[in-house]
Amino acid sequence: MPKPFNHISDTLKQKRERLISTFSSMRPAVFMKQHAWILDSYFRESFEHSMVGPDLALYKNPYAMVALGGYGREEQCVHSDVDILFLFKKEVPKATADLIQEIVYPLWDLGLEVGYATRTLRECISMSRKDPIVLTPILDARFICGMSILFSDLLDALRQKILTKQSKKIITWLVDQSRERHLHFGDSSYLLEPNLKEGQGGLRDYHTMLWIGRIKLNIRQPRDLEYFGHLSHEEYLSIRKALSFIWDVRNRLHLKSGKKSDQLYFENQIQLAESLRFKKRSGQQAVERFLGELHANMDFMKQQFLMFLSEHGYANTYSKKNRYRLSVQVEGLAVNRDMLDFVSSEHVVRRPELLVQIFEESARLKIPLSNEAKRIVSEFRHLIDNETRSNKQVLKGLETILREPVLTIDVLGEMLDSGCLLSLIPELKGIISRIQYDEYHVYPVDKHSLRTVQTVRAFGTDQDQSGCTFCGTVWKGLKNQKRLLWAALLHDIGKGIPEKNHAKTGAKIARKIMAGFGYSEYDVETVSFLVEQHLLLMKTATRRDIHDEETAIMCARIIKKVSRLQMLFLLTVADAVSTGRNAWSEWTMALLRDLFMKVMNILKKGELASRHAIQTIEKKQDTILASAKTPDERSRLALTFNIMSPRYVLTMPATNILEDIALYQNMNDREFVWHISKDETSDTRIVRICAKDRPGLFSKIAGMFTLNNLDILDAQIFTWRNDIALDIFTIKPPPDKIFEDERWAKAEKNLISALSGELDLASQLKKKMKTASAIKPRASKRPHKVNVDNESSSFFTIIEVFTYNFSGLLFAITDALYQAGLDIWVAKISTNIDQVVDVFYVRDVDGQKVDSEGQVSFIKEFIYQRLPEII
């Protein structure tokens, strides 16, 4: 490389390093512009000192260097690509390769990602006409050096030959590409790990606005969107503010990762929150506040992009078959171009209730608000006061909106985005864009609340996401659906207050809101109850033994009424479905439905007494004995039935008891026998193991399943009077179902070896465990937690272990319980992505609860010692 170019590239390197070192003290837009200017300086100096340049005969075949894409827009982030066009008037000379080597290669040597193209003017126009992917970077083109007249010729030819003639086609392609991009990368205002550039609400949405503006409106700079009347002054300033934050995050992400990066992964989020100086406040972690701010800005960009498309006739389509018969029923509103408008802002000042009624009409007519109407709502929503909230027409409108299903327009979402819903219910402020930093809660709390309402409304329709027709049946049977809809909207409102029990706090807030709207005391009490208890059924179904009569009785005593149970069940399902795909499964639905039916039975028939339990046992015994074909068989069945534990008989249906008797009779001298069946209702495997009982049996079975990559979802442990253990496991099927039989055969051999002592499970699992000494959660780092509950059950101590999932976890806990001298009678395993709640019903070796303070402390410490360090 010639000496001048060594000097030029060294100068570029030094300037970039100095600029990047001062990044944190600069506004992002200023930094990116200066970064682009530094590159401009490099290209200009290279052009001036080029050894190849004279051979290109500039006077005969003029050429220019042109910045493209983000470099052209002067949005040069720390590690953004440098896209450059070498534009020639007539032809691309052979010596161009030497020019590229002279100018571009030094940039590659510096580690810059440089994309270059060498084209003639005619080639640029031809390729841009055929391929919009070539066209869009040129829409951002900016002259750097060379013959400026050639750059002007490019812009003129582009306008005359392509943009003027094909504008509609190109814009349609841009809009279609945006929709495909959104489907692929997702809505960044919802995602746990958003894509800052390509996701919905990301920078590419802003770029698309600019491209459409340049094609259709011939804008030269972003502010022309305001000057030409397509954005208000406030909207333009708000866009720049949102962009500044996203640019700031993107540049810091580049610095943190040391490369171009747009996906905000968990491992970078905490460090970025610290870098941006977010602090813990109001019960929120710094990273939660950072992500809340990011989601709010990306959500704003998404709304602005959608409004911009709507303004130019590219909004999402909706049914217009009855558009000529549309007429409003509210004075002060009008339909213009199939959209709702205010007749004038003066009407809104005189009648603020119009700010809600326009959304009610939108729901009724199934047409959107115009952009101007949205602006008026945002500008005048401060007029909504207590008098407006107590207006019966406003309440009627809000109830209509809550009931209306989302078919083409999400009216409730539009109310939230415009700020109208917040003005109506100021208590929502604490949950707006509030993030819960884990891998379980996908959506900000406000968006999750609205999705819960949508999920409730969809029960029994083709949009039902529960996967269970039973929910639709229960929903249609409710006499008053509005109470459940209000509870769905408000169920997490307590998360806006830094209290540990958000349900109890939310119930108080909900009571105040409902009373403020003028609802009856019964309605207020019902909604408040649903909010306070919205976690009851889910926690009970996944953390308690639902086959224990005492569990259902406990729920029934809290709920008291059938109508409340029905609403609470639907709210529980909707809450889980709306939390994210990892919070809902067929297995969860099966547990909830089972618990619902048991509690419903108690509420209708009253609490089961001992006499009824005796009658149940006698009835099952009669059914079992009636299946005998000979007197000898009847005698054998009677003997076997008499050695079963009452708890087992009360829990199991007669058909299962007969299956287990057959399993037991096949044991002979074997250590265990098992039967594996498929549960059609929840895509799980039911493994029934009949074995000779011994200390540590459960932990050995758990270790065997772990060794074979079989996940336990639930376990029921029964011990008969003759020291036979009948353990029933619900197992997640192996991923590769083609070789499932081979997997089970191997698992059976492992269990035989483990019970005989030939297989040392602990050492085998230690080899298998990837993180035996420490685990690193991807998101939140909540400490391990062990609860010992001696109140919920009359006969068992309930131990809850809150931790993170790792290979060998269940074996580690159950082995610890065995070593601590405890017998496990029931196990509930609940895994939400990486977070785990394992629950065990235990007794000591004497069959007693573990309730002394010393015993409780010892057990907790013993389990903690088996859990790995969190790093």
Image (tube, rainbow, N blue to C red):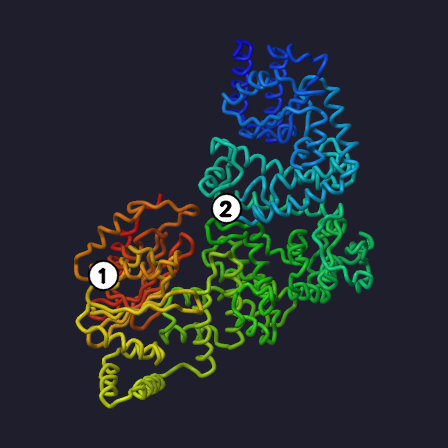
Residue 241, percent from left and from top: 64, 38
* Secondary structure of residue under mark 1: helix
Amino acid type of disc 2? Answer: Glu
Nearer the observer: mark 2 or 1; the answer is 1
Q: Residue at x 66, y 57 (%)?
A: 410
Q: Residue at x 44, y 69 (%)?
A: 681
Q: Quadrant of residue 558?
A: bottom left
Residue 643, percent from left and from top: 23, 80
Q: Residue at x 66, y 65 (%)?
A: 404
Residue 843, percent from left and from top: 25, 68
The residue carrying pointer 1 sits among few (fewer than 14), some (14 to 19) or many (20 or more) residues within 10 Å by Cα, namely: some
* 612 sits to left or right of 307: left
* 747 sits to left or right of 560: left
* Secondary structure of residue under mark 2: helix
* 775 sits to left or right of 256: left
Residue situated in front as seen by the camera: 258 or 469: 469
* 449 sits to left or right of 420: left
Residue situated in front as seen by the camera: 668 or 586: 668
Residue 593, percent from left and from top: 46, 71
Location of residue 146 with respect to 643 vertically, above or below: above
Q: Is residue 713 visible?
A: yes
- The numbered mark at residue 37 is none
Instruction: Give the quadrant of the C terminus.
Output: top left
Amino acid type of disc 1? Answer: Tyr
Q: Which numbered disc flags the more N-terminal residue, 2 or 1?
A: 2
Look at mark 1 in the image and give the residue it sits on.
Answer: 818
Q: Is residue 529 visible?
A: no
- The numbered mark at residue 288 is 2
The residue carrying pointer 2 sits among few (fewer than 14), some (14 to 19) or many (20 or more) residues within 10 Å by Cα, namely: many
User: Alpha-carbon distance for marks 2 and 1?
Assistant: 40 Å
Q: Residue at x 30, y 59 (%)?
A: 705
